[in-house]
Image (tube, rainbow, N blue to C red):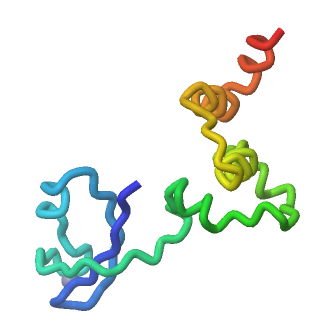
Amino acid sequence: MPIYEYACRNCHRELQALIMKAEDEKDLACPGCGGHNLKRLISRVSYHQSEEDRLADFDSASSRSDSFYRDSRNIGLQAKKRAREMGVDLGSGFEEKLEKLRTDPGSVIRDSE
Ligand SMILES: [Zn+2]
């Protein structure tokens, strides 16, 4: 998700905004003074990591706490990272299965029966 942080040049208030297209940014107004004189900051919103960032951060050798696996986006990440390290192309079928596993775990079990 493209979430950016801005600082108002008039009153120095900071705000975050979800920007889906360039026009969204033009409509942004400072919640403090209503001004449009905003400066985009380097985003510090780390929980909006892309999957690539997650893969880069992921250390497959270290053990993970239960909370890590409660985040469904992390399911399959270890398998994916290992496969990448070994140079295995999992193909688009794997991505589809992973997506199913994340959104509807029951369906994957049903499919493999
Ligand atoms: Zn302002």
Residue placed at 25% from the left, 80% from the top? 32
Q: Is residue 71 visible?
A: no
Q: Which image quadrant: the C terminus?
A: top right
38 is higher (above) or lower (below) than 113:
below
Query: What x and y, as percent, mark residue 111?
Result: 74, 12
Comparing 59 with 40, the one in front is 59
Q: Which image quadrant: the N terminus?
A: bottom left
57 is higher (above) or lower (below) than 113:
below
Image-based side of 73 in relation to 75, left or right: left
Comparing 31 with 18, the one in front is 18
> Residue 63: which quarter of the image?
bottom right
Residue placed at 80% from the left, 18% from the top? 109
Split into quadrants, the picture shows ligand 1 in the one at bottom left
Outermost residue on the top side: it is: 113
Q: Is residue 109 visible?
A: yes
Image-based side of 40 in relation to 16, left or right: left
Outermost residue on the front side: it is: 87
Query: What x and y, as percent, mark residue 88?
Result: 66, 42
